[in-house]
Image: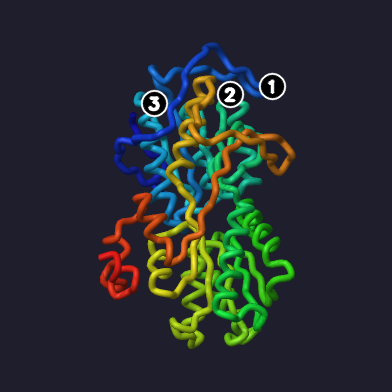
Amino acid sequence: MSTRTVHQRTVVGGLAAAGAALTLLVSGCGSLTTSGEDAERETHTVEEGFHVGLLLPELQTARYEAFDKPFFEEALAELCPNCELSYANADQDVDEQQTQAQAMLTDGVDVLVLDAVDSAAAAGTVSEAKAQGVPVVAYDRLAQGGVDMYVSFDNHRVGQVQAEALIAALEEEGTAGEGQIVMINGSPTDPNAADFKAGAHEIFEDQVDIGQEFDTPDWSPDQANSQMEGAITALGVDEIIGVYSANDGMASGIISALRSAGVDVDDLPPVTGQDAELAGIQRIIAGEQYMTVYKAIKPEAQIAAAMAVALATDTDPDLGEYRLTDVEDANGETVPAVLLEPIAVTEENVGDTVVSDGIYSIEEICTDDYADTDFCQEAL
């Protein structure tokens, strides 16, 4: 399988043997014709191979370049060794992603896997793909426009997991009901962020007092830092008993603001996160960040590859232990989907999650700055 870039911002890594548990049952032939104004789709075979386009949304979050892209490459190579992959990362630029998608469609991709920068804006890309007979897999974020399949995590549940962990931390510290929390949510253009926020609010209702709440453009750690500084000014640092941060990158900015306000490491309020970034895991073992949400990206990428191959070959994907369910997009259209379960990671289960799954090694986590932590002392 070959991989190529379509824009100067893209980063291409090498292929590794996948060992993927997901396999495709290739059967049937003929063309899949879609309804309405959609063009007739050409049916391909894995023996001959075909052209897949992968569009990822941003570089702020480490996961996309470090995990999503290489895992998808590996899985596609396992399922379709003769396939060609084009890859692009939009670096949080809506117009750039549209340009990248158009370039791929012009270049003749046979299926698109799209993680949209802006799900509403992506409707134009999805419609153009359908008009050309190119099926679209929505990856991680549910793009509008009538995609063919979708794989992500139960994003409402992600917010619930974060909120449940924060409440548990407050109860453990004995500070529940003694102050206010700050909510710093994700990007308003990311539908996943809205789901995280809704899930968290469902748990927080009648249990905590939310003193300040923000939505954070582009998931920016710098914006989160400024928002946290504003919350500290408005509420007083001593009144803040916890912080809901929608992801790890923003948690870094939040913790920096708290430290700048004079809060010692031992006195930091519990701060949530998401994505199990290496820096987030290191903050957790150092006692700066309370938790993160680990989303097993490898099966997500493998499922996306299986969906892409199935759509290109007009076959059913064998999803192993996973099952399709129906979700509705923003326009009320039904989309077959696989939704994976998120996992809360605290200091107590770092070894049983990101280490045991091979995401990070003990050596990667326990660098010189963290070697004296209890986790590293026990692990090394």
Say left or right for 36 vs 342.
right
> Which amino acid type is shown beneath numbered disc 2?
Gly
Cα distance between the residues tagged 1 and 3: 28 Å
Image quarter for residue 83? top left
Q: Is residue 259 above or below residue 84?
A: below
Where's residue 373, x and y in %? Answer: 33, 74
SS at mark 1 in the image: loop
Depth order, front residue of 263/188: 263
Depth order, front residue of 346/294: 346
Cα distance between the residues tagged 3 and 2: 20 Å
Quadrant housing the C terminus: bottom left
Cα distance between the residues tagged 1 and 2: 11 Å
The residue pinned by badge 3 equals 80
Q: Is residue 145 above or below residue 346?
A: above
Circle nearer the N terminus (3, 2): 3
Quadrant housing the N terminus: top left
The residue pinned by badge 1 equals 35
Front disc: 1 or 2: 1
> Which amino acid type is shown beneath numbered disc 1?
Ser
State the mark number for residue 133: 2
- State the count of labels: 3
Count neighbours of disc 3 (C-alpha within 10 A) and say few if under 14, some if 14 to 19, many if 20 or more. many
SS at mark 3 in the image: loop
Where's residue 320, x and y in %? Answer: 48, 32
Count neighbours of disc 2 (C-alpha within 10 A) and say few if under 14, some if 14 to 19, many if 20 or more. many
